[in-house]
Image (tube, rainbow, N blue to C red):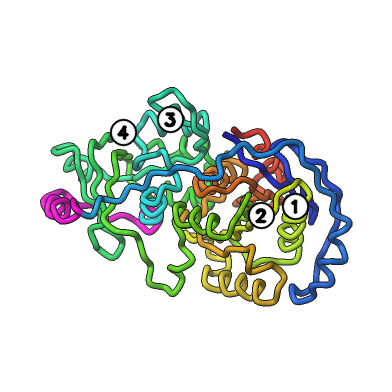
Amino acid sequence: MGVGFVSAAAGSAGVSLRPATCAKSSLFGSSLGHRQGIRAVRSSVRMTATAESTTSKSTSVKDLFIPEDQVASKREEAESLYKIHITEVDYQWVHVLSEGWASPVKGFMREDEYVQVLHFNSIRQEDGTVTNMSVPIVLAINDDDKAEIEKTGKVALRSPSGEVIAIMRNCEIFWHNKEERAARSFGVTDGRHPYIDEIYSGGDWLVGGDLEVFDRIRYEDGLDDYRLTPAELQAEFEKRGADTVFVFQLRNPIHNGHALLMTSCREHLLEMGYKNPILLVHQIGGKVKADDIPLKERIMQNQAVLEEGVLDPKTTIVGIFPSPMLYGGPTEVQWHAKARMNAGCEYYIVGRDPAGMKHPNGERDLYDPWHGKKVRACTF
């Protein structure tokens, strides 16, 4: 199943399952409060559609939460198991997995899944179907962890704060070739890249298995109400009477170019015949670079945009996507779109240099700024 995409060129946009033809326009240096500036250039943006999305409007996803009637017995079991403390980023991946964003993946990846993701950006399921999956979701461990887990094939996971949050069963342990993982995922092996630094600081082994999570992950930071699960988002889309959903992924505040993309996309979807397209403004909620703007400030700014009427609160949902930021460019764009498909989104906005960053040497962009659009257009 495909997902539609919206491509952008310096403030231009298109909606398509295939590469869109876009007219260029620019909108720089003005405040979001100056709505007339946005309206003034809207007419100069040309968008084309080459096909309708074939994605189901109600995507079935499987979460990994333990049924309520089994929680007590499995907590007792967890107390008897070897326990490992996971990192902040690992905790965020547990969050992603538990709610079904990576469905049909059922836990941290075993070697067969890992190799397919690393080399094919996809996973072949038991029934023969192939699912797009471009980023490895793996758990690194050390030699002591390996020795203990091999005794039972099971392990309990502790959060960074020490709480037992999950059990992983039927574990498989395999070598963590860090340089290969970095090279295949990012095209570079420079440890100054923020996520490559995470990889290099991890253990020399990877462990995969079936994940069973006790409770929904909460951060108690005043933002949990924005962290809607895929199932909750689908229910909200239905409640609002959506006949299609388009999504804009962000790790920054909304600026005028973003607002232009989103409002123009909605207008084009209406021209295509949709009656009530709903927009999901989805901020990355996991770990980001130190120089990125903190999540709370981003959410507050997004809410202000709705309150000012730049985006219509009746047709816009502001939410938080729990994934950490990888800064993986076109490879990561596939993951961002695939996860939102699991929430029922049908169109995905792609701008310039999505999920990109400067090369660690600071001399150039790490990725071609338009390859994210091209990859998204070709991805199944």
- Residue contact at pointers 4 and 2, CB within 8 angstroms: no
Image point 62% across, 42% down: which residue? Answer: 330
Q: Which residues are magenta?
A: 69-90
- Badge 1 vs badge 2, beta-carbon distance below 8 Å: yes
Q: Residue 46: horizontal and vertical position, in percent?
A: 85, 50
Q: How many marks?
A: 4
Q: CA distance from mark 3 to mark 2?
A: 38 Å
Q: Earlier in the sequence, mark 1 or mark 3?
A: 3
**Mark 1 = which residue?**
270
Between disc 1 and disc 3, the foreground one is 1
Dot 4 or dot 2, earlier in sequence: 4
Q: Badge 3: few (under 14), some or many (20 or more) residues near its Cα, within 10 Å? A: some
Rendered location of residue 294, percent (x, y): 53, 69
Kind of residue indicated by mark 1? Leu
Callout 2: 10 Å neighbours few (<14), some, many (20+)? many
Is 219 on the left or on the right of 250, as rendered? left
**Vertical comparison of 370 with 39: above or below:** above
Q: Between disc 1 and disc 2, whose residue precedes?
A: 1
In this picture, is 285 found above or below 300? above
Above or below, 132 relative to 89: above
Label 4 sits on what residue type?
A: Phe
Q: Residues within 10 Å of mark 4 (few under 14, many from 20)?
A: some
Residue 125 location, quadrant: top left
Numbered badge on residue 115 = 3
Frontmost of labels 4 and 2 is: 2
Distance from disc 1 to disc 2, alpha carbons, whole Å, reads 7 Å
Q: Nearer the viewer, residue 151 or 295?
A: 295
Which residue does the numbered mark 4 point to in the structure image?
Answer: 174
Identified at 51% across, 59% down, the residue is 236
